[in-house]
Amino acid sequence: MGMIQHSRLSVAPMMDWTDRHCRYLHRLMSRRARLYTEMVTSAALVRGNARHLIAFDEAERPLALQLGGSGPAELAEAARIAAAEGYDEVNLNVGCPSERVQSGTFGAVLMKRPELVAECLAA
């Protein structure tokens, strides 16, 4: 998995919005925009049958998978799956203010635990 070249335009990951069809439309509007998937939880990817959630078309590249989670080992495994599936980048969700997301101990609530975020990123 390589680094995505920096661009001036990013289309933020949005739950129930930035699915593969939306990303394809965004890619038609700009070849240079950085696109993100909807957030996928590390648990769903590692323990569930979530590979259909991370399917993408080559035309969407460059593309980042946004993961939600707070378990370093599980996030590391999810990142390995993302790399094997061909994602250009993995993004850890530490910004979503949704109560639904934060109740799962990911999103903006992680900003209160910088040591845990560091462990997750190091894994």
Image (cartoon, rainbow, N blue to C red):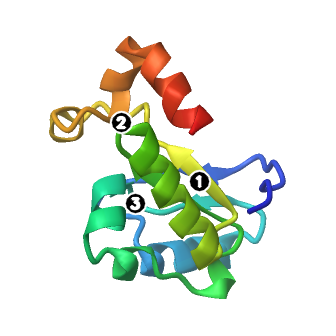
Mark 1 or mark 3: name the one nearer the start of the chain: 3
Residue at 58% of width from left, 71% of height from top? 26
Task: Residue at 57%, 35% (x, y): give it.
Answer: 121
The x, y position of residue 80, in whole percent, is 57, 62
Q: Secondary structure at mark 1?
A: strand
The one of 32 and 62 positioned closer to us in this rendering: 62
Disc 3 and disc 2: Cα gap in Å?
Answer: 17 Å
* Residue type at the position of mark 2: Ser
Q: Label 3: which residue? A: 38
Residue 56 picture location, percent across and down: 53, 82
- Rendered image: mark on residue 60: none
Give the residue type at disc 1: Val
Count of residue discs: 3
Mark 1 vs mark 3, foreground winner is: 1
Residue placed most toward the observer, 15 or 85:
85
**Type of amino acid at the residue the image marks with label 3:** Glu
Q: CA distance from mark 1 to mark 3?
A: 12 Å
Q: Residues within 10 Å of mark 3 (few under 14, many from 20)?
A: many
State whether residue 122 is above or below residue 86.
above
Residue where numbered disc 2 is placed: 70
In the displayed orientation, state which residue is furthest to the right: 5
| Circle number at residue 90 | 1
Instruction: Say what secondary structure mark 3 lies in.
Output: loop
